[in-house]
Amino acid sequence: MRNAALVLGVIAGVLGMIVGFFGYGYTEVIDRFGELPDLAEQVENPGRVRAFALIAPLLALAGGAMARSVAQIGGGLMLASAAGMYFAFGYGVFTMFPIALAALGGILALAAVKPDPH
């Protein structure tokens, strides 16, 4: 289970980075060039999107990396990452996989009370 949590955390972190790049970039483009009514409008809280665009993928990557050695802490980090992505970006077509993978990896890491057999 620890290996599965590691893989899920790393994949969630990479996908979360892609979502984060676009989320951060979108808020910057709207700030620089202005809104287009009914087409491109600024998000409610751009600071939150920008902060979690960095924090949430890092938590998933760090949690995945820690899943083999300290599974419970890694699991907590991955669950925090899933919550952060949901809080900042919401649940949609581009965020469902990073959120679900981070949450599943976190649950698997927390459930791994014994080391995996080699």
Image: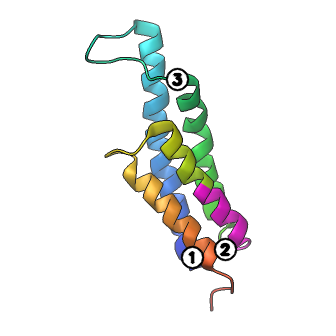
Q: Amino acid at mark 3?
A: Pro
Can you say whether 67 is above or below 38 in the image?
below
Q: Earlier in the sequence, mark 2 or mark 1?
A: 1
Q: Nearer the viewer, mark 2 or mark 3?
A: 3
Q: Amino acid at mark 1?
A: Asn
> Marks 3 and 1, how far apart in space?
35 Å
**Majority secondary structure in the magenta region:** helix
Q: Residue at x 68, y 72 (%)?
A: 71
Distance of label 2 from label 1 (alpha carbons): 6 Å
- Magenta-tinted stretch: 68-79
Identify the image quadrant of the C terminus.
Answer: bottom right
Q: Residue 39 location in percent, x, y?
A: 26, 18
**Front residue of 83 and 98:** 83
Outermost residue to the left: 38
Q: CA distance from mark 2 to mark 3?
A: 35 Å
Judging by the rendered image, the residue that carries numbered circle 3 is: 46
Q: Amino acid at mark 2?
A: Arg
